[in-house]
Image (cartoon, grey):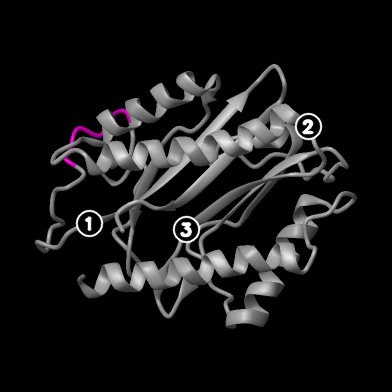
């Protein structure tokens, strides 16, 4: 295992622990706004790891806001008693980037729980598919993620299904350069080396939605580990 992959796995473990502590501390509760929960998680990350730096905007979305893709900035909602929400944080640990996202359900709504479980299963299905291929373009992988959404009975809600990850600042994710993303217009092999001849590492993100029910779910973590 090269140093980059080792570092990325280590920082993801820290991100996973941070997320686990949200439950331990009881941070995700009804009556709190998305912004309040965002601040609580930021403070928890600082308490645990001294982190103040994030390589992308911190996202907490509840209710109908879970339909919104990354680039949108919807109104701040209050978390409800029977709500679904997702959290997407990109903390930087010792100049190495993590990107971690999970969905949570308050209450016992069966459809919301199904969505939460489906995105986890679909993420693993997509990873297995990726690992089974020696060559795959970002476009082909995006199409597979969209296909999985249909199989599970949802619509794929993301404009992308992942992106590059690495040492901060990693290869800048210029929106016009689709080769940095799992994107329908990326026709480059995801296994191709970077400009310096190094292997590239990718994040896989799954965003399923149901517009009629106004619910969405999100699951994100390191793909190439």
Between disc 1 and disc 2, the foreground one is 2
Image coordinates of residue 195 in percent, x first then y, are 13, 58
Task: Count neighbours of disc 1 (C-alpha within 10 A) and say few if under 14, some if 14 to 19, many if 20 or more.
Answer: some
Q: What stretch is highlighted in magenta?
A: 184-189
Between disc 3 and disc 2, the foreground one is 2
Tell me: 214 left or right of 36: left
| Residue placed under numbered mark 1 in the picture | 200
| Residue placed under numbered mark 3 in the picture | 99
The secondary structure that dominates the magenta segment is loop
User: Which numbered disc covers residue 109?
Assistant: 2
| Disc 3 + disc 2, Cβ < 8 Å | no
Of labels 3 and 1, earlier in sequence is 3
- Per the model, the C-alpha gap separating discs 3 and 1 is 15 Å
- Per the model, the C-alpha gap separating discs 1 and 2 is 40 Å
- Residue drawn 39% across and 30% down? 145
Local secondary structure at mark 3: loop
Task: Please say whether residue 165 is one of the residues in the magenta stretch.
Answer: no
Of labels 1 and 2, earlier in sequence is 2
- Residue drawn 74% across and 67% down? 24
Of labels 3 and 2, earlier in sequence is 3
| Disc 1 + disc 2, Cβ < 8 Å | no
- Residue drawn 24% across and 75% down? 3
């Amino acid at each position: 295992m090269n140093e980059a992959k080792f570092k990325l796995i280590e920082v993801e473990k820290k991100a996973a622990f941070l997320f686990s502590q949200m439950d331990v501390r009881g941070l995700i509760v009804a009556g709190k706004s998305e912004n309040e929960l965002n601040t609580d998680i930021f403070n928890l990350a600082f308490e645990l790891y001294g982190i103040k730096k994030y390589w992308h905007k911190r996202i907490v979305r509840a209710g109908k806001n879970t339909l919104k893709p990354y680039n949108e900035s919807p109104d701040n909602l209050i978390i409800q008693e029977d709500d679904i929400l997702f959290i997407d944080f990109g903390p930087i640990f010792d100049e190495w980037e993590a990107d971690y996202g999970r969905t949570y359900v308050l209450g016992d709504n069966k459809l919301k729980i199904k969505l939460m479980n489906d995105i986890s299963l679909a993420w693993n299905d997509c990873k297995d598919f990726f690992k089974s291929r020696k060559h795959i373009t970002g476009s082909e992988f995006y199409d597979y993620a969209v296909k999985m959404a249909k199989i599970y009975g949802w619509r794929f809600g993301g404009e992308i299904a992942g992106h590059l990850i690495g040492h901060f600042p990693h290869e800048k994710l210029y929106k016009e350069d689709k080769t940095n993303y799992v994107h329908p217009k990326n026709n480059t092999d995801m296994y191709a080396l970077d400009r310096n001849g190094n292997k590239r590492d990718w994040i896989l993100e799954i965003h399923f939605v149901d517009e009629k029910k106004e619910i969405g779910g999100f699951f994100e973590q390191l793909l190439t580990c």
